[in-house]
Image (cartoon, grey):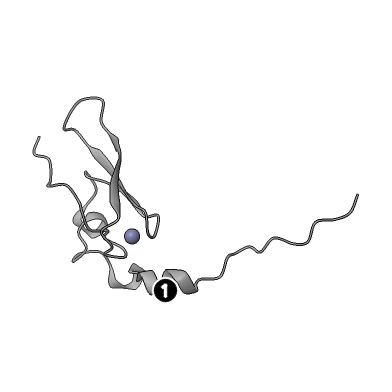
Amino acid sequence: MTQPAQSSICPRCRSTTVDIRMTSPVPGAWTVYGCNTCSYVWRSTEPAENTDPDRYPEVFRLTPAELAAFEVVPTIPPLRQS
Ligand SMILES: [Zn+2]
């Protein structure tokens, strides 16, 4: 099985904060990558739309600046007194 080159750019936000999260028990079968900027996680065996920054659907792309502006949902209500 041919293993794609290691992903070093996040398909969703194009940051380079990508780590290997898991590798297959059988060496070279698959690798799970994770982005430390936007939390996107993908397997090396997924289609190019999920793994290649240039093929990832534009509508789902994010920038690190957008991430910083997102609201935290849901907000945590005040704790009740018991
Ligand atoms: Zn990312």
Residue toward you, 56 or 7: 7
- Mark 1, secondary structure of its residue: helix
Q: Residue furthest top?
A: 26
**Percent x, y of residue 77:** 75, 62
Tell me: is circle 1 under 8 Å from ligand 1.
no
In the image, ligand 1 is in what quadrant?
bottom left
Q: Dot 1, crowdedness within 10 Å: few (<14), some or many (≥20)? A: few
Residue drawn at x 23%, y 55% as measured from the top left? 51
78 vs 5, left or right, is right
Residue toward you, 61 or 17: 17
Residue 61, compared with residue 52, is above or below; it is below
**Percent x, y of residue 80:** 85, 56
Residue 5, compared with residue 49, is above or below; it is above
Residue drawn at x 30%, y 55% as measured from the top left? 17
Quadrant of the rendered structure where residue 65 is? bottom left
Which image quarter holds the N terminus?
top left
| Amino acid at dot 1 | Glu
Residue drawn at x 21%, y 25% as measured from the top left? 26
44 vs 73, left or right, is left
Please name the residue that numbered disc 1 is placed on.
66
Q: Residue furthest right?
A: 82
Residue 56, compared with residue 39, is above or below; it is below
Number of numbered discs: 1
**Percent x, y of residue 36:** 37, 54
**Percent x, y of residue 76:** 69, 60
